[in-house]
Structures are given as C-alpha cells and as structure tokens.
Amino acid sequence: MAEKGLLFVVSAPAGCGKDTILNELFKKTDSAGYAVSATTRSPREGEVNGVHYHFITREEFERKIDEKEVLEYTEYCGNYYGTLRKSVNDLIERGKDAILKIEVEGAMNIRRLFPEACLVFILPPSWEVLEKRLRDRGTESEEKIIERTRQARTEIGYAKNYDYLIVNDKLAVAVDDLLAVLRAEKLRRSRNDALLNGFEEGGDA
Ligand code: 5GP
C-alpha cells in the first residue's frame, strides 16, 4: 500500500462539527496527523500554540509568505490563516496522512497545487439543524448567527468541487465515514502502481 502519507483537506461551515470529528478521528488512528496552520488571530480559550495553530504576528506571517513557507493562505474575518509547508512535509515524510482543516478557497488552492489531494466536505444534516447548532452555542448574537448562516451557504456552494461528502448527523457515523475515506484513498490503484508492477513482471499464470 502507499507508503508516503497522503494529503487530505477537510472543510465545513462553522457549526458542522469538524473539530469534534477530527478530535475523535485522531483518537482512533495514528496513521493521520493534523497539519497545524499558522494564523494571526488571537488564541481562544483552551487553544495551545503549536497544537491548534501557530499563533504569530502579521509581520511574521508576511515574512513566511515572502519566504515561501506557506503553501496557501487566506484572509478570513480580518486574520491571516495559512498552511505551513513544514507542517505538511513533516507528516508526509513520516508516512502519515496530513489533514488540513481549511476553508473552501484554501481547499481549491491546494487542489490546484496538489491535484492528487483528497478533499472532504462535511455537511450538516439540514439547514434547520445547522441554525439550531449555531444558536445552541449561545455565544453569538442574532446578527452573527445570520452572518454565519449566510457564510455557510457560500461555503456549501463549493462542496461540489470536493471528492467526498460526509453528513454529520451522528458523530460516531461521521467519524467512521472519514476513517473509511482515509482507508479507501490508500487503496486506490493509481496510488499503488508499484504493487501491480511486481505482479506484471513475474508470475507464471
Ligand atoms: P477559526 O478561526 O474558526 O479557527 O478558523 C476560521 C476558518 O479558517 C476555518 O474555516 C478554518 O478551517 C480556516 N483555516 C484554518 N487554517 C487555515 C489555513 O491554513 N488555510 C486556510 N485557507 N484556511 C484555514
């Protein structure tokens, strides 16, 4: 089977539970790792530098862009977010699949740079459920909820460009679905030509 790690992108609008899905996934497999991005936004409560993000200043971020240390980046709600080349390479070279948890435009850029990357989009079960989840967080004003719902609509518009869709209705099912995608991608014939070559050259059938 493919020995080098593969590149996966996971995107979802806010409220679809992608962080929870990924946290559960990493409890179930150590064949994949999270490629930690850099951002200029401030850490939220409980976020750890180097684990959730590399929290850096705008100057540092811009230096990284100039020195080609970021594979792709975007400005989202006034902050820079970018995939660090080193975060991805460190995982892939150790044979681990690199999971990029990035928004839709970043995902499209990754697709252009790495056509072999696998893109997974996580959907809510319905609009009603998504809105309810955003409201139940209880941390945001009505105005913010409307803005996030509008943003979700735009983001879901990109889902047609992804390879896999996972509906997060029941968490355990969504996690299993993502594990299945990771596994199936490793078995793709196109990623395992070396395996077939061995059979074509030898054998007495
Ligand atoms: P948050 O501030 O909620 O952690 O992230 C905001 C959005 O930025 C999320 O959709 C997240 O997936 C996305 N994001 C995080 N890191 C990156 C990155 O490196 N590149 C891009 N393009 N988006 C990112």
Image (cartoon, rainbow, N blue to C red):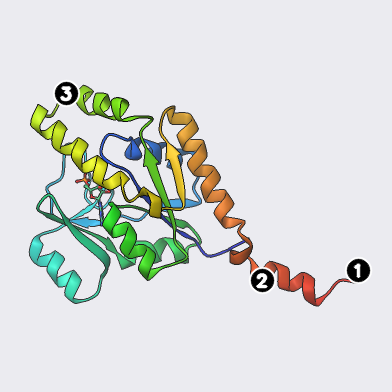
Instruction: Give percent across and percent down for residue 21.
Output: 39, 37
Residue occupying the point 33% across, 60% down: 108
Residue at 35% over, 63% down: 110
Instruction: Please tell me which of labels 2 and 3 falls first in the chain.
Output: 3
Q: Amino acid at mark 3?
A: Gly
Asked whether disc 2 touches disc 3, contact meaning CB atoms under 8 Å apart, the reply is: no
Q: In the displayed structure, would residue 173 be above or below residue 186?
A: above
Residue 93 is marked as none
Question: Residue tagged by mark 2?
Answer: 194
**Is 44 or 148 nearer to us in this picture?**
148
Assess disc 2: are there few (<14), some (14-19) or many (≥20) residues with their C-alpha within 10 Å of its C-alpha: few
Q: Residue at x 57, y 49 (%)?
A: 183
Q: Is residue 141 visible?
A: no
- Which residue in the structure is indicated by mark 3? 138
35 left or right of 48 in image: right
Where in the figure is residue 93, as x and y percent of width and height? 46, 66
Horizontal and vertical percent for residue 164? 47, 48
Amino acid at pointer 1: Ala
Q: Amino acid at mark 2?
A: Ala
Residue that numbered label 1 is attached to: 205
Picture quarter containing residue 165?
top left
User: Residue 69: horizontal and vertical position, in percent?
Assistant: 25, 71
Picture quadrant of residue 111: bottom left
Report the Cα–Cα distance between label 2 and label 3. 53 Å
Q: Whole-Å distance between the Cαs marked 1 and 2? A: 19 Å
205 left or right of 170?
right
Asked if one can make out residue 103 in the rendered structure from this viewpoint, the answer is: yes
Q: Quadrant of the N terminus?
A: bottom right
